[in-house]
């Protein structure tokens, strides 16, 4: 079985490289944007012709949430046109696509976890381009899995955990938003889930939600990061109004994981347990 991964140098791509060592029966092909540019259909075709993948995990994405507000065309190029190109080539080569999406497709106005059937209503350019990418894939392909996730972090790439630990070395006090609620998700746990979907051979195509279990504010997340890493800092909870950003974030974006757990029998760790386990 050949599994081709796009965006291999990104956070999730690196997490998949880390996890792949546990699966010697799968032949993984990891491609960076230089080797496979999803905005260039010919580039995708060339790699597919050479590698002949059975599955493609697309982790390539424009993820600069705030920057997308001022350069929506760049976000659109990668998140929509890139997704369209991949879907079309996957169709031509009969490849099953696993595409990673986001909790930002929701407006955050609910107070209970979002299911796959809940109405989407993105509040940012980034969220809109990710939703448009989802729709494009659904229009073109039948054999796809769209996996929405949230608050991704790990030892790889740039993420909230690494930012907090860096800031703690530079400052004695820090204010972190406490009125946005979601679920931190370890990229390695998501990588494992993606591989489990492939190995299940279920062909239960569609949209799925995956994040770690539980709910937290960014303040809760920061507090736990510092606690585990034995960092002493004056951490203050602040409202979103005190930390304005160009892009609007969902106030509440906890994802309901019932579907992915039921269909694929995936056990999901609590976010705190995963944070502790991966940081020991």
Image (cartoon, grey):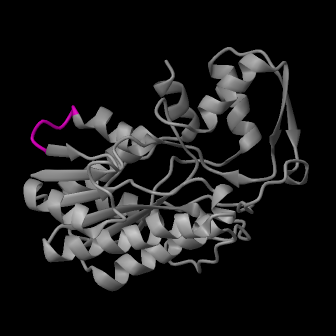
Magenta span has 229?
no
Name the one closer to the observer, 197 or 33. Answer: 33
Examine the image and state in which quarter residue 169 appears.
top right
Please indicate, yes or no, whether residue 114 appears anywhere in the rendered image: no
Q: Which quarter of the figure has residue 104?
A: bottom right
Give the percent coordinates (x, y) of residue 75: 54, 64
Residue pictured at 36% horizontal, 80% vertical:
138
Residue at the bottom extreme of this rendering: 139
The prevailing secondary structure element of the residues shown in magenta is loop
Residue 21 pos. (x, y %): 21, 32
| Residue 268 to residue 226: above or below | below
Q: State the extent of the magenta-drawn residues as a range.
A: 21-26
- Residue at 64%, 73% (x, y): give it: 122
How many numbered discs sit on the rendered protein? 0
Residue 23 located within the stretch drawn in magenta? yes
Residue appearing at x 45%, y 57% in the figure: 61
Report whether 243 appears left or right of 139.
right
- Residue 214 on image: x %, y %: 60, 47
Q: Residue furthest right?
A: 242
Q: Is residue 133 above or below residue 2?
A: below
147 lies above or below 219: below
């Amino acid at each position: 079985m050949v599994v081709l991964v796009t965006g291999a140098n990104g956070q999730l791509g690196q997490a998949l490289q880390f996890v792949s060592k546990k699966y010697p029966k799968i032949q993984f092909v990891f491609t960076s944007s230089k080797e496979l540019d999803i905005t260039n259909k010919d580039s995708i075709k060339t790699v597919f012709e050479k590698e002949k993948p059975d599955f493609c995990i697309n982790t390539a994405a424009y993820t600069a949430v705030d920057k997308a507000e001022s350069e929506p065309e760049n976000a659109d190029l990668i998140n929509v046109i890139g997704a369209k190109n991949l879907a079309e080539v996957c169709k031509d080569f009969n490849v099953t696509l696993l595409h990673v999406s986001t909790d930002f497709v929701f407006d955050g106005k609910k107070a209970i976890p979002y299911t796959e059937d809940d109405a989407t209503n993105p509040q940012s350019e980034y969220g809109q381009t990710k939703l448009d990418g989802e729709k494009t894939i659904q229009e073109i392909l039948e054999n796809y899995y769209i996996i929405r996730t949230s608050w991704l972090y790990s030892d790889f790439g740039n993420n909230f955990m690494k930012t907090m630990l860096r800031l703690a070395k530079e400052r004695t006090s820090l204010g972190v938003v406490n009125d946005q609620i979601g679920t931190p998700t370890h990229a390695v746990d998501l990588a494992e889930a993606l591989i489990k979907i492939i190995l299940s051979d279920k062909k239960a195509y569609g949209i799925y939600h995956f994040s770690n279990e539980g709910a937290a504010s960014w303040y809760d997340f920061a507090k736990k990061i510092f606690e585990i890493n034995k960092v002493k800092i004056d951490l203050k909870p602040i409202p979103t109004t005190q930390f304005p950003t160009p892009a609007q974030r969902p106030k509440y974006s906890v994802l309901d994981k019932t579907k992915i757990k039921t269909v694929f029998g995936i056990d999901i760790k609590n976010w705190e347990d995963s944070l502790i386990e991966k940081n020991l």
